[in-house]
Image (cartoon, rainbow, N blue to C red):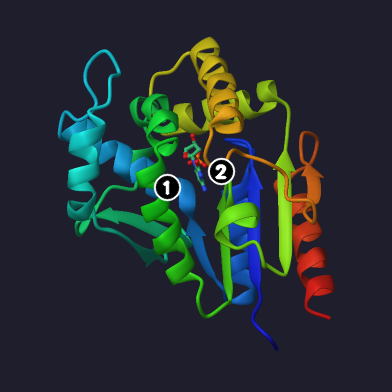
Amino acid sequence: MKKITIAIDGYSSCGKSTMAKDLAREIGYVYVDSGAMYRTVTLYALDNHIIQQDGHIDEERLRQEMKNIEISFQFNPERGRPDTYLNGVRVEDRIRTLEVSNHVSPIAALGFVREEMVRQQQRMGQEGGIIMDGRDIGTTVFPQAELKIFVTASAEIRAQRRYDELTAKGEACDMQEILHNVEERDYIDTHRDISPLRQAPDALVLDNSHMTIEEQKQWLLREYERATL
Ligand code: DC
């Protein structure tokens, strides 16, 4: 069967990656979490004090250091999805902290960061047989993707999901802070100049506010089957 490209875009914490990685496993496709790549650049910038205490980004330094940031993925059979590596070191947990979440949107708004990430993402998708999730996958990275999904859910529901995820990992967090972070990221992601979060005209919309993970999985599988008929 022909291997297609599947682009899944949408707001933060709306369960895109869960449904994407489940489908990838089911149909034997490669899954790439493009948000993890922007998070990894952010982690590098935090570790190397390119982002200062007050949030200021030393853009010139980051531009020069982009060549020192090597991002890769390695499938982790225990988690059933790829782990993210920065220069050969596993950073999967470190990129999910609230500190990285709080700084990632301004990093993802930088043109030179996006150019490099998009280049790497397009290279990963050259052969097809890929499911990538993010904000600009159906619009910029793979505008020719055979199946495009745009996922949405209310900000409150997404904040609750993020809260549950972080508390399950034992990370202390505050619901109001998370909601604020979700809303702030929505704003930056949809208002930035380069590749803002937009629904591609040919994307199918999925509002999963009141759907279970299983229902979403079935919905996506049906759409995949329809796209490959
Ligand atoms: O999906 P996520 O929450 O892990 O994404 C982290 C950040 O990266 C988020 O603020 C939006 C940004 N991002 C982006 O700009 N483009 C993508 N393709 C994926 C993520």
Q: Position of residue 98 (x, y in %)?
A: 39, 26
Mark 2 residue's CB less than 8 Å from ligand 1: yes
Q: Would you place residue 83 above or below residue 157 in this image?
A: below
Mark 1 residue's CB less than 8 Å from ligand 1: yes
Which of disc 1 and disc 2 is earlier in sequence? 1
Q: CA distance from mark 2 to mark 1?
A: 9 Å
Q: Secondary structure at mark 1?
A: helix
Q: What's the amino acid at mark 2?
A: Ser
Left or right: where does residue 40 sit relative to residue 215? left
Q: Are marks 2 and 1 in contact (CB under 8 Å)?
A: yes
Q: Quadrant of residue 67?
A: bottom left
Q: Would you place residue 29 above or below residue 88 in this image?
A: below
Task: Tell me the number on the disc at residue 114.
Answer: 1
Task: Tell me the number on the disc at residue 88.
Answer: none
Q: Position of residue 31 (x, y in %)?
A: 52, 64
Q: Which residue is mark 2?
A: 195
- Location of the C terminus (image quadrant): bottom right
Residue 93 seen anywhere in this rendered image of the structure: no
Q: What's the amino acid at mark 1?
A: Arg
Q: Position of residue 217 (x, y in %)?
A: 73, 57
